[in-house]
Amino acid sequence: MTYYAIAPGHQVNVRRGPSTDSELVKVLPQGSSVPIRCQSRGETVSGPCGTTDIWDCIAPGQYVSDAYVKTGSSDFVAARCSG
């Protein structure tokens, strides 16, 4: 599984679903890297890596906005989440 760095100098909120209204699960510290299991569309978020509605699933029930993950792409880099 490929790991991607989160934007330097940022802590990232991990949510239960692809929305900032979704329950906060945990906060990733600066310098973290995350695996992307799958990706889905959700709330549009602006961050250091751009403005996007793509959310990265890093574990079951754990999503981070792709606006804070350095994937090198503004499009999907992993399979879409099912369901």
Image (cartoon, helix red, strand yellow):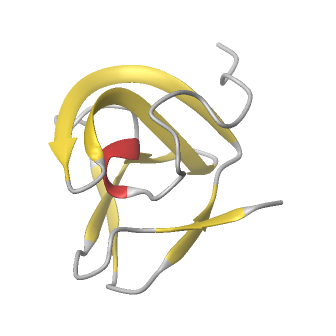
Whether 41 is drawn above or below 56: the answer is above
Left of 3 or right of it: where is 4? left
On the image, the x and y values in percent for residue 66 come to 40, 44
Q: Say which of 55 and 8 sits in front.
A: 8
On the image, the x and y values in percent for residue 19 come to 27, 32
Q: How many marks?
A: 0
Can you name the residue that lies furthest to the right here? 1
Left of 83 or right of it: where is 67? left
Whether 39 is drawn above or below 60: the answer is above
* Residue located at (64% from left, 13% from top): 83
Can you name the residue that lies furthest to the top here? 83
Q: Quadrant of residue 53?
A: top left
On the image, the x and y values in percent for residue 41 come to 43, 19
Whether 72 is drawn above or below 28: the answer is above
Whether 83 is drawn above or below 20: the answer is above
The quadrant in which the N terminus is found is: bottom right
* Residue located at (54% from left, 52% from top): 71
Can you name the residue that lies furthest to the front here? 72
Q: Say which of 33 and 21 sits in front.
A: 33
* Residue located at (25% from left, 75% from top): 11
* Residue located at (31% from left, 78% from top): 8
